[in-house]
Amino acid sequence: DFELNLARCVDQMTLPELGVMAMGFFKTQTPIRNPELLTQLYQRLDSELDTVEDIVLVALLKVLRYSSKLPQVEPLKQMLSALESQVDRVSLLTCLHMALLGCELQTCNDALVERILLRFERELETSRLKDMERICLVMALFNITTKSGVERRLAERLPDLLRQRMEEILRHPRCFSNCLQFLTMRGVYDLELLGVALEPRFLKHAYPSGLPGREYFHLDGFARLLGQEYQGAL
């Protein structure tokens, strides 16, 4: 068994080598099922967290998020706490993957998420559409309310920022729809942008197969609930 043999060799491998291994699991959409191997990865990453490179950290965070189940909740919580000290050291993209780590198990570390949101707020103008989608997901899923109020400030700024990203939206239309969906889950919506997302030509561009994603049905239902306030396409 590959995972069993891998668990026996973890101590002999460098963290970058484990990162390559993790990338292989994630790229092939193969979760790690061996609980012993998962425990070793959590422990190994924790022991080298202060020096791990971004690309290795992201690879390991991805496979841990993809593979962790209920038995891994405790090591996951410990990792989320440990990651808080790394927010200012690593890239914004790495921070976003840190925020996403607990999504599958819906496990949130409020202090970590708040620090990441504050970091994202500082770099908001230069963030990519895909980064906005990720941070909107985190804010919507965890429904966090911070002492600093950063989640509210971000949610209120994002619609105007989306207007400036039309080229990116044309390349990644579903990212745009997802952003709007997640923002509505925080009670923030923009009638003009909602109309764009539900406009028939945009739908054909976003869903060339003719099969819309769940974000479309969410936005369509939300627009209908607005009643006369929304005058756009349905």
Image: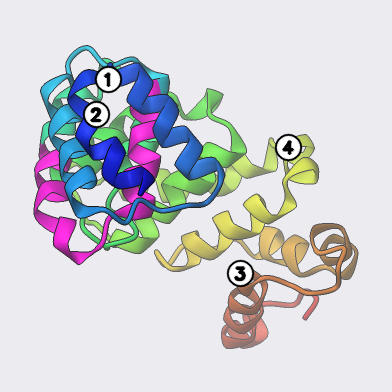
Q: Amino acid at mark 1?
A: Met
In the image, residue 93 sits, relative to residue 140, either above or below, namely: above
- What distance separates the C-alpha of mark 1 from that of mark 4? 40 Å
In the image, residue 175 sits, relative to residue 167, either above or below, namely: below
Instruction: Please name the residue shown 52% across and 51% down the image.
Output: 29
Q: Which residue matches tag 1?
A: 13
**Residue 157 in view (yes/no):** no
User: Residue 168, which numbered label?
Assistant: 4
Which of the two discs, 3 and 1, labels the residue nearer the N terminus? 1
Horizontal side of residue 147 vs 92, given as left or right: left
Instruction: Please name the residue shown 74% across and 52% down the image.
Output: 173
Mark 2 vs 4: CB contact within 8 A: no
- What distance separates the C-alpha of mark 2 from that of mark 1? 7 Å
- What distance separates the C-alpha of mark 2 from that of mark 3? 43 Å
User: Residue 141, which numbered label?
Assistant: none
Which of the two discs, 2 and 4, labels the residue nearer the N terminus? 2
Q: Quadrant of the C terminus?
A: bottom right
The segment highlighted magenta reads 56-81
- What distance separates the C-alpha of mark 3 from that of mark 1? 42 Å
Horizontal side of residue 74 vs 213, given as left or right: left
Mark 2 vs 3: CB contact within 8 A: no
**Residue 161 in view (yes/no):** yes
User: Residue 215, which numbered label?
Assistant: 3
Is residue 61 found inside the magenta-colored segment of the image?
Answer: yes
- Which x, y percent locates residue 177? 65, 59
Give SS at disc 3: helix
Instruction: Please name the residue shown 28% across and 20% down the image.
Output: 15
Q: Nearer the viewer, mark 1 or mark 4?
A: 1
- What distance separates the C-alpha of mark 4 from that of mark 3? 18 Å
- Which x, y percent locates residue 67? 34, 53
Q: Which residue matches tag 2?
A: 9
Q: Nearer the viewer, mark 2 or mark 1?
A: 2
